[in-house]
């Protein structure tokens, strides 16, 4: 067996052959320990080696990466971790928000019950206004307008809309005192008689369906002309002690025969609730068919009810048109009363020759010739014809007098002339 001489880093030669223990001396006289070649594992394979080796299976200690545990459910943070502190109710008025039509308070009205009707397609072509934006614009526009102000622009005061009975039954009027209203008579005809339903953009059923939400029909928001006090149901609606104003209401139901809507005033929190504090739904009908009756409920016609989802300017014109028609009709009724009160003596009667000729023509009918009581009926008809003739003559005299002195008779409204169209034949 040959040996190999190895030079260390200190230029010292040493042998890799097995050698015994001890100290060796170099030729230069330096002493160094003898290097012994050992078998590491074979030297410790004896009893009690585990105490010398330690834990050789675990390997070195390392720091584990725990980033993968973030995706686990137990390490996901809860939502309340990101909640912001709630503002106190006392500081809510100090917070300024931008314009919005969203319902921020507790409300009994569905969101869609405020949406106006627009004639726009659901698919918007390029360059056109989207349907949702147009709806939002109209909601903001309608919400800014005041119905009392719009009626005032039309020359109408809310106090003049409802007819009132005179306390003593006698009305004291000063004629021609105001050039704009020379006949300031109090109104006495109901306004709904002159209502024009062509202004309506929805049918009564469509208005009520705007309150449908999850199969329950909730109230529809609006404003109605109703009494300010709710303890006057036993009084006549024309009682002069009743004061009428526009109040925020919820529309509950509609009666087709009477053409009236059932409405209920909102409380001080803007809600429509019953005596137990629950929202009045399905028109206030119970399961047994009975209806919830409250002092704040009224049956009103359409002209006295404004829906929040309709154009307030258009509704003001609707009320103004009915108001003007009623005023004109009452003026024509007074005009006919003036003529009826004129004396008929000395006006003249219908020419007897003309009357006799009409009688002979009437008797010429085969069915009337055999009637034995025809002469009695003819005498009654002659009186009516003479009265109508005298009234026509008084009307001609009255119209001529009024037209000659319009300043004195400014309180009189003459009817519009009717042009008679001549028939083509006959």
Image (cartoon, grey):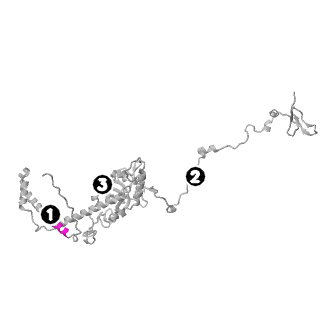
Which numbered circle lies on residue 120?
none
Please report whichever mark, 3 or 1, sits nearer to the chain's N-terminal start.
3
Q: Is residue 45 left or right of residue 397?
A: right
| Marks 1/2: CA–CA distance | 90 Å
Q: Is residue 150 above or below residue 6?
A: below
Circles 3 and 2: CB atoms closer than 8 Å: no
In the rendered structure, find residue 81 and report the number of the disc placed on it: 2
| Number of the front mark, 1 or 2 | 1
Looking at the image, how many numbered discs can be counted on the residues?
Answer: 3
Q: Nearer the viewer, residue 398 or 43?
A: 398
The magenta-colored residue range is 393-404
Q: Residues within 10 Å of mark 2 (few under 14, many from 20)?
A: few
Looking at the picture, how far across and down is residue 168, in whole percent? 26, 70
Does residue 398 show up magenta in the picture?
Answer: yes
Q: Secondary structure at mark 1?
A: helix
Front-lying residue, 414 or 61: 414
Q: Which residue is mark 3?
A: 198
Choose top left, top right, bottom left or bottom right for residue 6.
top right
Task: Please identify, in this view, whether the residue under mark 3 or under mark 2 is nearer the observer.
Answer: 3
The residue that disc 1 covers is: 392
Where's residue 177, x and y in %? 27, 72
Residue 258 belongs to the span the image colors magenta: no
């Amino acid at each position: 067996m040959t040996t190999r001489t190895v030079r260390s880093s200190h230029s010292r030669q040493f042998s890799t052959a097995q050698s015994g223990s001890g100290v060796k001396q170099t030729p230069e006289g330096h002493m160094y320990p003898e290097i012994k070649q050992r078998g590491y594992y074979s030297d410790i394979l004896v009893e009690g080696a585990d105490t010398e080796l330690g834990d050789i299976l675990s390997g070195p200690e390392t720091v584990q990466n725990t980033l993968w545990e973030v995706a686990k459910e137990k390490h996901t943070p809860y939502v309340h971790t990101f909640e912001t502190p709630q503002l106190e109710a006392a500081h809510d008025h100090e917070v300024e928000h931008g314009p919005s039509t969203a319902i921020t308070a507790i409300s009994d009205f569905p969101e869609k019950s405020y949406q106006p009707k627009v004639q726009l397609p659901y698919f918007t072509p390029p360059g056109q206004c989207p349907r949702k934006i147009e709806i939002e614009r109209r909601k903001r526009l309608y919400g800014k307008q005041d119905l009392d102000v719009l009626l005032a622009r039309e020359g109408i005061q809310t106090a003049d809309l409802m007819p009132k009975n005179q306390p003593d039954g006698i009305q004291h009027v000063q004629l021609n005192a105001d050039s704009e209203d020379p006949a300031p008579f109090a109104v006495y005809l109901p306004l709904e008689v002159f209502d024009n339903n062509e202004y309506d953009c929805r049918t009564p059923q469509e208005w009520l369906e705007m309150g449908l939400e999850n199969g329950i029909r909730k109230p529809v928001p609006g404003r109605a002309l109703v009494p300010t006090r709710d303890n006057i149901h036993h009084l006549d609606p024309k009682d002069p002690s009743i004061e009428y104003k526009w109040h925020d209401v919820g529309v509950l139901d509609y009666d087709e025969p009477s053409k009236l809507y059932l409405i209920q005033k909102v409380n001080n929190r803007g809600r429509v609730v019953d005596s137990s504090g629950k929202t009045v739904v399905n028109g206030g009908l119970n399961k047994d068919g009975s209806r919830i009756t409250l002092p704040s409920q009224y049956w009103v016609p359409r002209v006295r009810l404004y829906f929040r989802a309709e154009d307030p300017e258009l509704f003001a014109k609707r009320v103004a048109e009915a108001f003007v028609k009623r005023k004109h009709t009452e003026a024509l009724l007074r005009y006919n009363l003036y003529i009826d009160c004129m004396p008929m003596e000395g006006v003249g009667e219908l020419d007897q020759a003309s009357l006799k000729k009409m009688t002979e023509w009437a008797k010429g009918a085969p069915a009337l010739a055999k009637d034995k009581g025809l002469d009695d009926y003819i005498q009654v008809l002659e009186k009516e014809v003479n009265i109508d003739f005298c009234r026509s003559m008084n009307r001609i005299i009255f119209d001529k007098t009024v037209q000659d002195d319009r300043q004195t008779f400014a309180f009189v409204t003459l009817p519009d002339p009717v042009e008679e169209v001549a028939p083509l034949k006959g």
